[in-house]
Amino acid sequence: MEVSGKIKVINPEQQVSASFRKRELVVTTEEQYPQHIMVEFTQDKCDLLNSYKVGEAVKVSINLRGREWVNPQGETKYFNSIQGWRIERLQAETPATQMPPVPAVEAFEPATNFNEEEHDDLPF
């Protein structure tokens, strides 16, 4: 799956535990009702965000993740997350390239040096 839009927020890397790190990115979609989508990049994927800046148009490849958790009272809760695994810059749309104008064609003049008796090698 993919999410496209402009970068709204790039959070600093968080060291969650000794062996787990994450970094969050918020992408604002460009549609009639823009959505602010928070995408987590984890472990070595955190470094993918180093060369990006707020305001850039991007396409983020994502996976949806869901997990179940039972609290101490025995209630089951569900959590979803959006994990990014690739990010690409989108090129700003350039105006359609226009074809160069067709040069004006001079008025057609019939050949005056045509001789029907000349032999040519055309088969028809």
Image: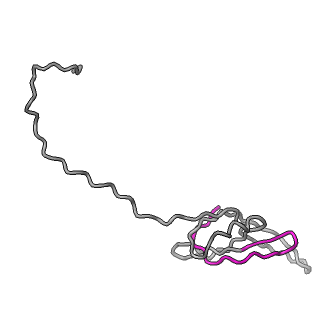
Q: Residue at x 18, y 47 (%)?
A: 105
Left or right: where does residue 87 sit relative to residue 33?
right
Q: Residue at x 51, y 75 (%)?
A: 32
Q: Toward which corner of the image does residue 14 lie, by quadrant?
A: bottom right
Q: Is residue 12 magenta?
A: yes
Residue 117, given in percent of the width and then of the height, sits at: 10, 19
Q: Residue at x 65, y 62 (%)?
A: 61
Residue 9, given in percent of the width and then of the height, sits at: 64, 78
Extreme residue toward the right, this view: 72
Left or right: where does residue 37 sit relative to residue 15?
left
Nearer-the-camera pick, 29 or 104: 104
Residue 120, given in percent of the width and then of the height, sits at: 19, 20
Q: Is residue 111 magenta?
A: no
Left or right: where does residue 67 sit relative to residue 49?
right
Nearer-the-camera pick, 117 or 6: 117
Q: Quadrant of the C terminus?
A: top left
Range covered by the magenta-colored residues: 1-23
